[in-house]
Amino acid sequence: MSITGIMIAAAMVGILGLMMGLFLGIAAIKFKVEVNEKEIKIGEALPGNNCGGCGFPGCSGLAAAIAKGEAAVNACPVGGDAVGKKIAEIMGVEAESGTRMTAFVHCQGDCEKTSKDYEYYGIEDCRMLQFVPNGGAKSCNYGCLGYGTCAKVCPFDAIHVLNGVAVVDKEKCKACGKCIAVCPKNLISLQPYDAKALVACSSKDKGPVVMKACTNGCIGCGICKKNCPSDAICVENFLAEIDQEKCTGCGTCKEKCPKKAII
């Protein structure tokens, strides 16, 4: 190739590059997306776990919602009050202190306390057991299956299966709610970190059926309700429920429960 041909080719490439640069520059100006500075700062303040516990698609989704005034400044369950205060400063508002919550497994049905109908050999995923007889090998159809699906999805290593039943480490739990969403038995709920009394059972079977399946299951006898001095307990569908706002933590319900279902 001659020198002239090379120079022409180089000039054409240069002109093409200049045209593309001008086009991209004009497009960037025309289609520029206005960035909310508060949203950026809020995103930097959030922990970045992207757990979805706030109800939004990740931390960026929550940051956008807070900046628009569509979510509370303390909506991040992982960051808690500390992050809430930082975001409140960014938004120029006051942060209300929220109640710290932790996940709680409403079951004590470990290998010693529950009976089994058969031995299960298969995929160790609690969600798969809905396809086997009685929803699992344990006699209690409401209890923890013990295969740790909740533990596998927990991003904070706050749940472990101990002797056949899931147990939550309150100190590690960030109340993201992932364990609640994945439990096929719906026996995990968010409870106040400082809850004084909780019913560790989810069975809605009648007393005689519960006693055959588990030594510590709630039989719906109502003794806890009758003896509660603050009227904080009700019994529905043969299962006791405690109103945490009324509970004073006197311990009477735990003391009186004949099956030790309240902890």
Image (cartoon, rainbow, N blue to C red):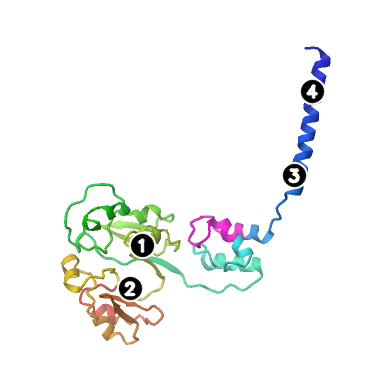
- Sequence-wise, the earlier of marks 1 and 3 is 3
Q: Which mark is residue 10?
A: 4
The amino acid pointed to by label 4 is: Ala
The structure residue drawn at horizontal position 30% and vertical position 51%, both measured from the top left corner, is 128
Membership of 126 in magenta stretch? no
Of 5 and 193, nearer the camera is 5
Cβ–Cβ under 8 Å for marks 4 and 1: no
- Sequence-wise, the earlier of marks 3 and 4 is 4
Cβ–Cβ under 8 Å for marks 1 and 2: no
Badge 2: residue crowd in 10 Å (few <14, some 14–19, many ≥20): many
Q: At which x and y percent is residue 69?
A: 62, 67
The structure residue drawn at horizontal position 51% and vertical position 72%, both measured from the top left corner, is 98
State the CA–CA distance, disc 4 to disc 2.
78 Å
The amino acid pointed to by label 2 is: Leu
State the CA–CA distance, disc 3 to disc 2.
60 Å
User: Is residue 110 toward the left or the right of residue 180 in the image?
Assistant: left
Q: Which residue is mark 2?
A: 198
The amino acid pointed to by label 1 is: Val
12 in relation to 135, above or below: above
Q: Which residue is mark 1?
A: 168
Q: Nearer the viewer, mark 3 or mark 2?
A: 3
Picture quadrant of residue 60: bottom right
